Image (cartoon, rainbow, N blue to C red):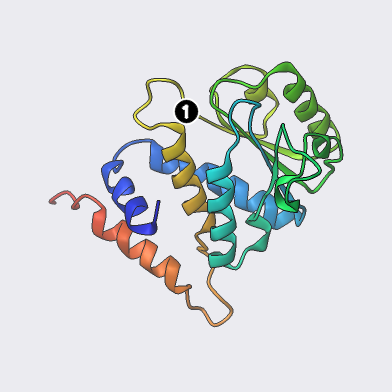
């Protein structure tokens, strides 16, 4: 989904809770990886691997000048013969430590083995973020979560697009006091698609 489609999606969602919720979650994600300076580990369930989110976060990391946003995709069926960026298995979660951020994307709730690994990573000091399944043990152990329940206005893929786009936005001014072009365009799109002000 490109920037124009994200802007259109934001326009459609104006006045709903989704825009604020996705921006808050994205802010927690970005704040965690930037302030701690550790790596971002991205993991899904055995049935659902968040490839698309990984690709978008890599793009946002490059465009925003925030390399910390580029995740390491942790795959349940990774093999040593896979390319390096696809060969990281669940054992990497056991090595997660303070300063690292673990983003778990789970449409239906993770199984017990993944929950145990996430719990161990949290005990070791990693920041845990949960996206998708709205409830249960994962939400309870996450530092920040964003639920996408069945029957919601948006599906998990659309929410991932909004989160990744918002995570890449840099609202902080550059040393010369100018915002990056991409951020100015995003802000302009938000202003142009906002509902008109109420008459006084």
| Point 51% across, 44% down: residue | 24
How many numbered tags mark residues here?
Answer: 1
Q: In the picture provided, is 136 more to the left or to the right than 21?
A: right
Quarter occupied by residue 122: top right
- Seen in the picture, residue 117 relative to 135 is either above or below; the reply is below
Q: In the picture provided, is 155 more to the left or to the right than 57?
A: left
Residue that sits furthest to the bottom in the current view: 176
How far from the left and from the top, in percent, is residue 4?
33, 57
How far from the left and from the top, in percent, is residue 146?
53, 33
Q: Nearer the viewer, residue 200 or 45?
A: 45
How far from the left and from the top, in percent, is residue 13?
31, 41
- Seen in the picture, residue 11 relative to 4 is either above or below; the reply is above
How far from the left and from the top, in percent, is residue 14?
29, 43
| Point 43% across, 73% down: residue | 181
Secondary structure beneath label 1: loop
Residue that sits furthest to the front in the current view: 81
| Point 80% across, 48% down: residue | 99
| Point 50% across, 60% down: residue | 169
Q: Nearer the viewer, residue 200 or 60?
A: 60
Quarter occupied by residue 155: top left
- Seen in the picture, residue 134 relative to 143 is either above or below; the reply is above
Disc 1 residue crowd, few under 14, some 14–19, many 20+, Cα 10 Å: many
Q: Which residue is mark 1?
A: 148
């Amino acid at each position: 989904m490109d920037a124009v489609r994200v802007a259109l999606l934001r326009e459609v969602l104006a006045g709903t809770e989704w825009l604020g919720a996705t921006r808050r979650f994205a802010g927690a994600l970005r704040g965690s990886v930037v302030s701690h300076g550790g790596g971002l580990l991205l993991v899904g369930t055995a049935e659902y691997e968040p490839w698309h989110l990984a690709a978008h976060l890599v793009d946002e990391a490059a465009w925003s000048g925030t390399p910390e946003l580029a995740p390491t995709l942790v795959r349940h069926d990774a093999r040593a013969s896979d390319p390096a960026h696809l060969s990281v298995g669940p054992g990497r979660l056991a090595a997660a430590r303070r300063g690292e951020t673990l983003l778990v994307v789970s449409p239906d709730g993770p199984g017990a083995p993944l929950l145990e690994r996430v719990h161990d990573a949290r005990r070791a000091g990693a920041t845990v973020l949960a996206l998708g399944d709205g409830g249960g043990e994962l939400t309870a152990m996450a530092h920040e979560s964003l639920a996408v329940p069945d029957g919601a206005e948006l599906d998990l893929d659309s929410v991932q697009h909004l989160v990744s786009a918002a995570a890449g936005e840099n609202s902080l001014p550059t040393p010369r006091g100018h915002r990056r072009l991409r951020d100015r365009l995003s802000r302009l799109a938000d202003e142009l698609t906002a509902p008109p002000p109420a008459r006084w």
